Amino acid sequence: APEHKDSDMALTILAEQQDGLLLLTLNRPDKRNALNTDMYLALTEAFQQAAQDESVHVVLLQGQQECFTAGNDLADFMGKSSLEADDPILQFLHTLADFPKLVIAAVGGPAVGIGTTLLLHCDLVYLGDNARLQLPFVELGLVPEFASSLLLPRAVGHLKAAELLLLAEAIDAGEALRLGLANRVVAADTLLAFAREQGLKLAAKAPKALQKSKALLKQELRQAVHFVIDLEARAFSLALQGEEAQSRIARRLGRTAAS
């Protein structure tokens, strides 16, 4: 019988383990799973523990079938004067980029900002047919993060990466699949079950062989990814303090509060 372990990390990240598969669910649906400091801390801790736990072979990161994440919690974000090296966001970025085991993402509905850039660090990505990916950094007076300025052009080509990052228009699941940002698109109501099934299939494979294969796939860019994460973070930090971002984010928050 499968072993089920349930726990909650501040309730906004739910963890469940089954047969070598660790499911991490973003669980802040009232805020469209917008990521705040507590969630980054909980995710970092979960990934760090999973890296050490020999009973975990694969991690599946998901939201609900109708929402993956609306990106960073802008109100939480505006409280930051800068992104220091020990900031929970940066800790999470480096932890996921360095995570030695397989990571699957199951994305239904909106995947905004980091909701899209984190997919570049996953090993397999499954989208619901309702998924919409968007990178609104420039729209907010900000710059790309999570090494997306390095990884996105390699994934989709320079011109398409520029279009996604500079025009900041959302793309649907079909377009994301065509661009090579996903492995498969499935009906939204089957997404989470399908991703779990794929995760369990992978978790049943030889764990050392999986890890070594992942390491080989990632090794060429490993150092560059960490370097660019920090490079982008410095530029992001400066942008966050600038007038462009301050006014645009304040407008966005005003609209959100009014809606």
Image (spheres, grey):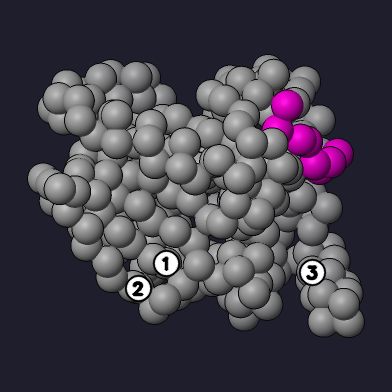
Tell me residue 137's x, y (percent): 73, 51
**What residue sits right under mark 2 in the picture?**
9
Secondary element type, mark 3 = helix
The residue at 63%/42% (across/down) is 188
First along the sequence among labels 3 and 1? 1
Q: Between tags 3 and 2, which lies in front?
A: 2
Secondary element type, mark 2 = strand
The residue at 72%/42% (across/down) is 130
Give the image quarter of residue 82: bottom right
C-alpha span from label 3 to label 2: 28 Å
**What residue sits right under mark 3 in the picture?**
249
Q: Mark 1: which amino acid?
A: Ile
The residue at 68%/49% (across/down) is 109
Q: Is residue 117 visible?
A: no
Q: Is residue 201 visible?
A: yes
C-alpha span from label 1 to label 2: 5 Å
Q: Is residue 86 left or right of residue 133?
A: left
C-alpha span from label 3 to label 1: 25 Å
Q: Which quadrant of the rendered structure holds the C terminus?
A: bottom right
Q: Mark 3: which amino acid?
A: Ile
Q: Which mark is residue 13?
A: 1
The residue at 35%/25% (across/down) is 218
- Circle 1/circle 2 CB separation < 8 Å: yes
Please give the range of residues in magenta.
167-174
On whether residue 173 falls in the magenta region, the answer is: yes
